[in-house]
Image: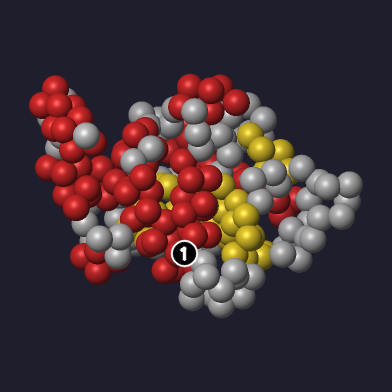
Amino acid sequence: MYTILQHIIDYLFPPTKEEVRIRSIPIDWLNMNCKKALQTEFPFIKAVFSYKDPLIKELIWQIKYKKNAHAIACGAYALYSELNKYKYTLTLIPIPISKERRKERGYNQCELIIDEILKLDRENIFIKDYNILTREKDIEKQTHKNRNERISNTKHIFKVNMKNDVNDLNQKIIIIDDVTTTGSTLKEARDELLRVGYTDVRALTIAH
């Protein structure tokens, strides 16, 4: 039934060749075949793949806007492969989305990615926390903004939620996002976490 439905959808809305490829690739294929990202502007941000790769660009689109389960699994595997190099406990937190964006989309794709990462984590090294960081205000989509506009747009948009002052400020935090461009959003999130006393905060994304 699913195959028939997919054929009907493809007939009505022809998929790109990259979308078709994503459907059939093993989850570890990207790691071996796609172009790696260059170093980001900030040393605390690590990106796995180059966003200039058409396949990676389609992967991000499928994750962010289509909630494509196989694309999410492929992206999660790539991130897990990087995280697994640390070999010590890490707290994974998603870049938060606003209430308005969640209502519009129905999900935070970074939470879905983390959930998939934890399925791969058989040694239970990683933990998740979706409540430490929240987004305080919605902002316009950054896609068509220049660098200065992006940086200005992301000021003071996050809030750290302290748990009655019993937060473990020594935990090692990795902020998970699907793609980074200027790094301004991730920097703002990290700065807010550092401001309240967290000491080890880094970020990992699928693409840059």
Q: Is residue 171 left or right of residue 148?
A: right
Residue drawn at the location 63% of the way across and 60% of the way down:
127
Figure label count: 1
On the image, the x and y values in percent for residue 116 come to 46, 54
The answer to whether residue 19 of the structure is visible from this angle is yes
Between 201 and 67, the one lying in front of the other is: 67
Mark 1 lies on residue:
120
Would residue 10 be seen by someone viewing this image from the given angle?
A: no
Residue furthest toward the front? 1
Give the camera-side residue of 167 and 119: 119
- Foreground of the two, 186 or 20: 20
Residue 178 x, y percent position in the rendering? 43, 47
- In this view, 84 is above or below 180: below
How dense is the environment of label 1, judged by Cα within 10 Å: few (below 14), some, or many (20 and up)? Answer: some
Question: How was this image coloured?
Answer: secondary structure
- Using residue 175 as the reference point, say whether residue 143 is left or right of it: left
Whole-percent x and y of residue 101? 52, 26
Percent from the top left, x then y, of residue 131?
A: 69, 44
Nearer to me, 67 or 144: 67
Quadrant for the N terminus in the image: top left
What amino acid is found at the position of numbered circle 1 in the picture?
Answer: Leu
Question: Residue drawn 60% across and 26% down?
Answer: 99
Q: Residue at x 64, y 45 (%)?
A: 130
Res 29 → quadrant: bottom left
Q: Secondary structure at mark 1?
A: helix
Residue at the location (66% across, 38% down)? 134
> Vertically, is 184 above or below 32?
above
